[in-house]
Amino acid sequence: MTHGRLLRAAVIGTGFVGPHHVDAIRRGGYAEVVAIAGTDAARSEARARQLGVDRGTSDVDSLLRDPEIDVVHVCTPNSSHFSLATAALEAGKHVIVEKPLALSAEEAGGLVSLAGRTRRHAGVAFTYRGYPMVRRARELVSAGALGDVRLIHGRYLQDWLLEATDYNWRLEPGPGGLSRAVADIGSHWFDTAEHVSGLRAESVMADLATFIPTRQRPRTPGATFSGADGDADPVAVDSEDAAGFLIRFGGGARASCLVSQVSAGHKNDFRLELGGSRRSLAWRQEEPNDLWIGTRDATGNSILPREPRSETVPGVPALPPGHPEGWAEALRDLFRPFYAAIRAGAPPPTEMQPAPYPTFSDGARAVRFVEAVLTSARESRWADIA
């Protein structure tokens, strides 16, 4: 029984994103983090000490068997998402998984079915849905402020893999999967575009490029966003450094997007614009507290700032306007409705009931999108998003 007490959460993954999940869980107001787990016992224990978490372990099985743990966050390399999420659900835990949900549509569909059978809350960390102005954009589109959505376009550009000496496990098909830039960051753009527009993508035409086919892999593995600065070995890389794609949406809307992890000077340049029959709307992640509203009469163009909103959940309140809220707050606010539902004893959402957080079904859609992108690029044709 969880109603009336702080939930107990465990995070699996000690790398880049795991500690951010620890921080977001704590600040959400619904849960405490009681354990963090990784593949290396010493590193897990050290990370637990750094983060002030009581338990650091490499024994994931014992963690999943612990009846005191209510929620498990899976923040590990992509290839382990399916097995860890499966084990957590079968152990009766509620689960949040970093994207991609799985490496194949078949695995993702299996997780959707398992979450339904176990009646557990199951979410995917599509962080950008948590931004206040992304939520505001969705409200405006839903209310008809843009008219009929006709065009969606944008980009997601980074430069952390610009050099041949830049290396990370995401470059390897074993832990990372066959797609890199699209699965890693393109999936975020795809989910946000569907979420804000309220439309569903039907098919995609994609072009992928690997500009650095040989990279230097450090003999001593480094952290995310680090490169080879010592002994290294040359390795062949097949996954895409960049991709461009066109999307056809149900209802006739069209979209285009460019994603890249090799664009110098762009750190986390996520942009999304929707053009409707009445107005346009644009949002940029690196300036997250404003929406641009465009009209035919240029004098009507405006910047819509973030407004104060009343708080309906516990935890750290939203900052007043003029105090920027960014990525960490978006992750916190993405988790809040997930934890609120569990603590209230609410049943998990169904396909017929809108969910207050991105579900495994949303994660499975993104996996199917990535598979369609790979098919399109390989066969030089439009590919259906099944």
Image (cartoon, rainbow, N blue to C red):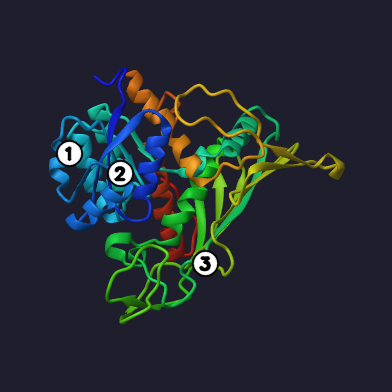
CA–CA distance in space, label 3 to label 2: 32 Å
Q: Which residue is drawn at the image coordinates 38% and 62% (left, top)?
A: 224
Instruction: Say which amino acid is labelled 3.
Output: Asp
Q: Which residue is drawn at the image coordinates 38% and 51% (left, top)?
A: 17
Which of marks 1 and 3 precedes in the sequence?
A: 1
Image position, residue 256 (x, y; %)? 59, 54
Label 2 sits on a secondary structure element that is loop
Pointer 2 local density, CA inside 10 Å: few below 14, some 14–19, many at least 20: few
Q: Nearer the viewer, residue 134 or 200?
A: 134
Left or right of 97, for residue 283: right
Q: Which residue is drawn at the image coordinates 46% and 69% (left, top)?
A: 161
Instruction: Say which amino acid is labelled 2.
Output: Gly
Image position, residue 31 (x, y; %)? 33, 31
Q: Can you tell which quarter of the image residue 164 is in?
A: bottom left
| The N terminus: image quadrant | top left
Do residues under tags 3 and 2 come within 8 Å of each other at their CB atoms? no
CA–CA distance in space, label 3 to label 1: 37 Å
Q: Is residue 378 visible?
A: yes
Which of pointers 2 and 1 indicates the residue nearer the eye? 2
Q: Which residue is mark 1?
A: 64
Q: Is residue 13 visible?
A: no
Q: Nearer the viewer, residue 88 or 100?
A: 88
Label 1 sits on a secondary structure element that is helix
**Please, is residue 73 above or below residue 381 in the view?**
above
Image position, residue 229 (x, y; %)? 38, 78
Q: Residue 159's mark?
A: 3
Q: Which residue is mark 2?
A: 52
